[in-house]
Image (tube, coloured by chain):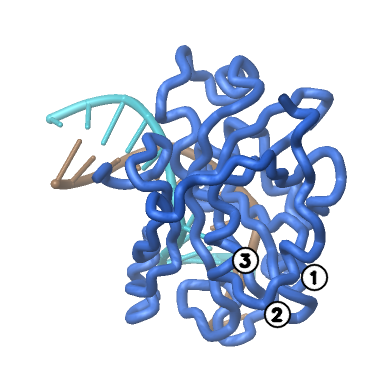
Chain colours: A blue, B cyan, C brown
DNA sequence: CTGACGATTCACT
DNA sequence: GTGAATCGTCAGC
């Protein structure tokens, strides 16, 4: 199983077009190995945040703060922040240094370590709610805010590919979720989902 | 130092 | 469908 995983190379993350990277992340495998506990899931939902010109992005207008500084790093690190005081949201930083692109992972399909995901989330059985929605993804995989700035080329937190891919016709673009405050940018088709997949958040088609 | 609020989730009506 | 939970972050004083 995991012996056929190949960690994504730096060139995957330094790509200039964050929309393209978000699209390519669909079908890849998000892997964590904290304290020797291996958990992994196949990414089925992502959202792109397109730098300083994107009103929905934390880096809109070139804003730099202690929290968002990591978005300006070279692609290939994690950006994790706390939302609503409760939920840890995991993002992948892309593009090169000083261009604050990021991709929010909103849904994965559990592959490895499901019993550990159940322990972390306190759930009793593995149904579609286990890793659907960005808060649940981080909780099930054990990702927390202190993992922000973690390199995706280490062994604790990374993204891999295993040769699997979804048919192109099943990957569709939609507007992003929960970004109504972004005005017209809220309409942009920067969210990618696997059509019909149960681990995609929001209303089911 | 203070206050308002969020790239959400879940329990409950 | 509605509302509470909950706290780090950031703008403003």
Count neighbours of disc 2 (C-alpha within 10 A) and say few if under 14, some if 14 to 19, many if 20 or more. many
Looking at the rendered structure, the secondary structure element under dot 3 is strand
Query: From the viewer's perspective, is A2 left or right of A22?
Result: right
Are marks 3 and 1 in one subunit? yes
Q: CA distance from mark 2 to mark 3?
A: 9 Å
Q: Which residue is mark 2?
A: A99
Q: Quadrant of the C terminus of chain A?
A: top left
| Residue A191 in the figure: left or right of residue A174 | right
Spatial separation of the CA atoms under disc 1 and disc 2:
8 Å
Which image quadrant is residue A98 in? Answer: bottom right
- The residue positioned 62% from the left and 56% from the top of the image is A91
Q: Are marks 1 and 2 in contact (CB under 8 Å)?
A: no
Residue denoted by label 3: A102
Nearer to the camera, A177 or A161: A161
Query: Going from the N terminus, do you reach mark 1 or mark 2 first?
Result: 1
Q: Position of residue B6 (x, y in %)?
A: 45, 62
Assign the N terminus of chain A to one quadrant of the image: top right
**A179 and A86: which one is in front?**
A179
**Residue A185's spot in the image, x, y percent?**
39, 78
**Residue drawn at 64 percent across, 72 percent down:** A101
Image: A104 above or below A158: below
Is label 2 in contact with label 3 (beta carbons under 8 Å)? no
List the residue tagged with mark 1.
Answer: A74
């Amino acid at each position: 199983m995991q012996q056929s995983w190949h960690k994504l190379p730096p060139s995957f993350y330094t790509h200039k077009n964050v929309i393209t990277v978000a699209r390519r992340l669909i079908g890849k495998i998000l892997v964590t190995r904290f304290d020797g506990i291996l958990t992994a899931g196949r990414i089925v939902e992502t959202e792109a945040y397109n730098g300083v010109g994107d009103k929905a992005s934390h880096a809109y207008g070139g804003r730099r703060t202690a929290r968002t500084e990591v978005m300006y790093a070279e692609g290939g690190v994690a950006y994790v922040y706390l939302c609503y005081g409760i939920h840890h949201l995991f993002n992948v930083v892309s593009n090169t240094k000083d261009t604050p692109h990021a991709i929010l992972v909103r849904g994965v399909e559990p592959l490895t370590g499901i019993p550990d995901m159940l322990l972390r989330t306190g759930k009793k059985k593995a149904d579609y709610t286990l890793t659907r929605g960005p808060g649940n993804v981080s909780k099930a995989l054990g990702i927390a805010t202190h993992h922000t700035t973690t390199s995706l080329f280490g062994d604790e937190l990374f993204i891999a590919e295993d040769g699997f891919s979804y048919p192109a016709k099943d990957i569709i673009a939609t507007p992003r979720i929960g970004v109504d405050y972004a005005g017209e940018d809220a309409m942009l088709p920067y969210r990618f989902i696997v059509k019909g997949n149960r681990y995609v958040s929001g209303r089911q088609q």
